[in-house]
Every structure is written in C-alpha cells, then in structure tokens.
Amino acid sequence: MPEKTSNWFKLRRIKRSQWAVILQSPWVLLSTSIRLHRNGYQKTLDHVNRLHAPVVPAELQAGIARETAFALAVAVRFGPWRPLCLTRSLALAWFLKRRGIPCVLRIGVPRGTPMTKPGEPVTFSAHAWVEHEGIVLNDRQDIAGQFSAFDTGTGPA
C-alpha cells in the first residue's frame, strides 16, 4: 500500500507543464512511430532537429529536461501501448527541441556481445536513449556503460 500512496503522491505533484507533455504524448508517440515507419530514422531525426524554439535559459534546461522525460515516462507507463526505445527517444527529443533544450539521441549496441559461431543465426540488438549535457534522461544513468554508442550524427542541431 505505501508504494501506491507514493506513486499517487508523485502524480499529485506533477506540474502543469508536465501534464501538457502527458496529454500530448500519445499523439506525439503515434505520429513519431508513423513517421519512423514511413520515412525512416534519418528523415524522422531531421524533422526533430529542424524544430526551433526560444532557448530556455541554461540554468533551467537540466531541470526542465528531467521533468519532461519523467512526464513522457508516466504517459508511456499508463498509456495504451509500449513504444520501442527509439520511438520514445525520438518523441522525447521532439519535446525537448520544441522547448529549445539541446539534447543528443544515442543509439548503441550491447558491450561485450559474444561473436556467433559459424552456422548460428546472427541476432542484432540495439538501444536508444536521450542525453542532455551528458546526463541520461530516459534510462538508467549507467546505460552508456552497458552499450557502445555509435556516431550517428544525432548531436545538438
């Protein structure tokens, strides 16, 4: 019972700006998913990077970025579907860029993945996350140590 009280308490403390993210998230996630499937990753990322908004003062950016990531996580947790990490990360980058907060979308493969033996099927796995000033926003802080991010040109644009 204390855990539910704790979660309810957290939900009651959500700011108005976070509620806006929660309410917009289903549509942003859906449109991001559709754009990703129709146009591919690079064109979807280009769309996100083209967003221009008034820049939030530097001293407020980290806090707003964390609040936005939390609100999107709430929307995903209580939403009707569980989008993949790439869709969630692109949606978070969209919300941040729309507010003028620079971020970097990272994609990586697991570190220490064993090589497959001849004749075994090759499996590929990857993970996506968003960082602001080197701080992981939508995953565990140690995720960058578990995955080798490859340079995909997703820096702040």
Image (spheres, helix red, strand yellow):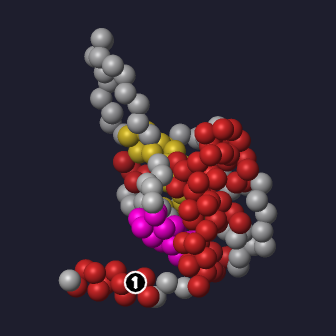
Quadrant position of residue 113:
top left
Reply yes or no: does residue 105 show up in magenta.
no
Residue beneath the point at 62% across and 60% down? 28
Identity of the residue furthest to the left in this view: 1
Name the side, left or right, on which 133 lies relative to 156.
Answer: left
| Residue on which the image places disc 1 | 10
Name the side, left or right, on which 154 lies relative to 149.
Answer: right
Residue beneath the point at 49% across and 84% down? 14
Q: Position of residue 117 (x, y in %)?
A: 28, 16
Which stretch did the figure color magenta?
A: 65-79
Residue 66 in sight in this render? no
Q: Quadrant of the image for the N terminus?
A: bottom left
Name the side, left or right, on which 13 lies relative to 21.
Answer: left
Amino acid type of disc 1?
Answer: Lys
Name the secondary structure under disc 1.
helix
Along the viewing direction, whichever of 70 and 130 lies nearer the viewer: 70
Q: Main secondary structure of the magenta part?
A: helix
Q: Position of residue 9 (x, y in %)?
A: 37, 87
Q: Position of residue 72 (x, y in %)?
A: 51, 67
Q: Quadrant of the image for the C terminus?
A: bottom right
Reply yes or no: does residue 67 show up in magenta.
yes
